[in-house]
Amino acid sequence: MTPAQKAMDQLAAWPDLTPCAAGCGTGRALRSAGDEIVHFHSERDVDLHLTARAIQRLHHDFAESTAIRLVPGSRWVTVHLDCDADVDLLLSLVSVALKAHQSPAGSDGSLAAVCNHHRVTVLPRHEDGEG
């Protein structure tokens, strides 16, 4: 089972999320009552819809993660899933996203389809001692 499938299976069981087609046209997604929250674009690449406030609050933590990619001005965060720890990170961030989108200022449905797909290049990680 790929990391993305593992994450999708776990998240699809959450009561606040409903599977749907990704608004960007590529892959599957999960949505809350008001917004698309997660786009699964490939076996390893996932876009997560946060809010500007959540991204700003977590920006320094994101900078330390090799799994996270940010696009300036985007309210989507790309998570590259290589291992179980990355899946756990995604699950935690989905929880943050759901909470952020519950507030009246959090919902931005007009931006929901403008994820980072094709705007982020994820390079493979090198293990210690490699390249």
Image (cartoon, rainbow, N blue to C red):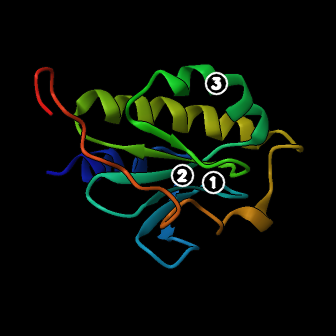
Q: Secondary structure at mark 3?
A: helix
| Residue at the spot 69% in from the left edge and 58% down from the top edge | 35
Name the residue carrying label 3.
58
Identified by mark 1, the residue type is: Ser
* 111 is higher (above) or lower (below) than 104: below
Identified by mark 3, the residue type is: Leu
Residue furthest to the bottom in view is 25
| Residue at the spot 69% in from the left edge and 52% down from the top edge | 74
Q: Which mark is residue 32?
A: 1
Residue 68 or residue 126, whichever sits in front: 126
| Residue at the spot 14% in from the left edge and 51% down from the top edge | 1
Query: Of tags 2 and 3, which is closer to the observer?
Result: 3
Name the residue carrying label 2.
17
Q: Quadrant of residue 34?
A: bottom right
Describe residue 21's horizontal placement relative to residue 72 as left or right: left
Q: Secondary structure at mark 2?
A: loop
Q: Position of residue 78 (x, y in %)?
A: 49, 48
Q: Are marks 2 and 3 in contact (CB under 8 Å)?
A: no
Identified by mark 2, the residue type is: Leu
Q: Are marks 1 and 2 in contact (CB under 8 Å)?
A: yes
* 93 is higher (above) or lower (below) than 21: above
